[in-house]
Image (spheres, rainbow, N blue to C red):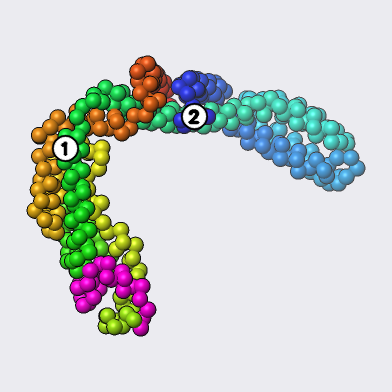
């Protein structure tokens, strides 16, 4: 189990258990000596390989030469083992069993059984590797769960903060100036886009790039070059879009190079159609006071390039808004009204959110403790 599906009990307990299992597995290997176990593993691998390779040929009345070759190879393997090799007796017992004039499949199976003590020792190395992988997986799950908890705690803290907002506060003190500005700038841009040449519009777009908080999407380079250098750039954007729908013969009456217009304007139709005032509007619920303080002067600088003085004045009022009203308190009210549904308000009123927040923080602390306890392996 991993990720957000795992509860703290699963994650923390599994981590501690995996840590203990790894310590036990390491201790078991150290007790018998890693080099000794690796030697047993090599010998066991060679023995089982001999059994597997010769079982079909060295049994019954099969290949006598293979039978002799097999017995000699197994004897050589057994006699070549160190006297103090763990489970050496298992290889000797298997060798004694195979020292017969004739072997059948049951003899090979019994030889494998005689090698079981060596296989058990070999398993200690595999168990240690499996324990290490399980421990690493448990730590990954714990860290992933912590990330989920951080997001959960942030969400609950925000929900609790919204629940503390005064839902009766006069948010119109924020909404009205923002709404008035948004309406004014949309109207001003619509008029400018409809009446000004595409060349003029693009120059405003280009100038806006100096103001990251009030910038339009950049004009595609080939479209910008066409509008700047060709006579068609003196037409408005709606007119260019209309031209792009004309047939070549009809369009030739309006521009000197119909193909160029259809290529440049037609290719970037989506950009032109979506070039609206959205980058200059202010969201509702409104942004944080500091962001509006930084953004409003940039809005003024861009809006002043195409709008009338009344619209620019509306933008200037936004710049002063955080200092003229209890901005953050009213913003919290706006956020609460916008985001809190009936179920969330009910959870807040009966204390469920606070209880969930406490449980999440406790869970985080316990997992952090488990991670600290199992660090360093």
Quarter of the image for the C terminus: give it. top left
Q: Is residue 318 above or below residue 136?
A: below
- Residue 35 is drawn in which quadrant? top right
Residue neighbourhood size for the residue with mark 2, other residues' Cα within 10 Å, grouped as few (<14), some (14–19), many (≥20): few
Q: CA distance from mark 2 to mark 1?
A: 38 Å
Magenta segment, which residues? 224-249
Q: Is residue 193 above or below residue 228?
A: above
Relative to 239, 69 lies left or right: right
Residue 198: image tag: none
Instruction: Name the outermost residue toward the right.
Output: 61
Q: Position of residue 12 (x, y in %)?
A: 46, 21
Residue 5: image tag: 2
Q: Residue at x 14, y 45 (%)?
A: 296
User: What residue would you read off at disc 1?
Assistant: 290
Q: Is residue 195 above or below residue 163?
A: below
Asked which secondary structure carries label 1, the reply is: helix
- Residue 237 is drawn in which quadrant? bottom left
Q: Main secondary structure of the magenta part?
A: helix
């Amino acid at each position: 189990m991993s990720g957000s599906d795992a509860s703290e009990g699963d994650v923390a307990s599994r981590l501690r258990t995996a840590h203990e299992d790894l310590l036990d597995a390491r201790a078991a290997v150290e007790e018998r000596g890693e080099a000794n176990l690796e030697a047993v593993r090599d010998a066991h691998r060679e023995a089982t390989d001999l059994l597997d390779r010769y079982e079909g040929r060295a049994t019954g009345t099969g290949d006598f030469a293979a039978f002799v070759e097999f017995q000699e190879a197994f004897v050589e393997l057994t006699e070549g083992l160190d006297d103090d090799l763990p489970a050496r007796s298992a290889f000797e017992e298997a060798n004694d069993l195979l020292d017969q004039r004739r072997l059948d499949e049951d003899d090979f199976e019994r030889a494998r059984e005689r090698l079981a003590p060596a296989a058990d020792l070999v398993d200690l190395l595999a168990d240690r590797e499996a324990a290490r992988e399980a421990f690493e997986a448990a730590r990954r799950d714990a860290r992933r769960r912590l990330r989920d908890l951080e997001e959960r705690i942030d969400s609950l803290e925000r929900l609790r903060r919204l629940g503390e907002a005064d839902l009766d506060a006069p948010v119109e003190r924020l909404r009205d100036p923002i709404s008035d500005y948004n309406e004014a700038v949309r109207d001003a841009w619509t008029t400018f886009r409809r009446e000004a040449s595409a060349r003029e519009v693009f120059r405003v777009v280009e100038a806006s790039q100096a103001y990251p908080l009030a910038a339009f999407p950049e004009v595609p380079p080939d479209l910008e070059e066409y509008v700047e250098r060709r006579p068609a750039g003196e037409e408005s954007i709606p007119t260019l879009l209309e031209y792009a729908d004309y047939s070549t013969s009809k369009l030739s009456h309006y521009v000197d190079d119909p193909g160029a217009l259809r290529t440049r304007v037609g290719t970037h139709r989506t950009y032109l159609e979506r070039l609206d005032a959205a980058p200059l509007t202010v969201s509702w619920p409104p942004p944080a006071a500091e962001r509006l303080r930084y953004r409003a002067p940039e809005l003024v600088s861009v809006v002043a390039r195409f709008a009338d003085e009344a619209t620019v004045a509306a933008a200037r009022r936004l710049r002063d808004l955080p200092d003229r009203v209890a901005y953050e308190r009213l913003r919290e009210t706006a956020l609460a009204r916008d985001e809190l549904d009936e179920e969330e308000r009910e959870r807040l009123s009966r204390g469920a959110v606070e209880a969930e927040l406490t449980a999440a923080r406790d869970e985080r602390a316990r997992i952090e403790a488990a991670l600290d306890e199992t660090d360093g392996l």
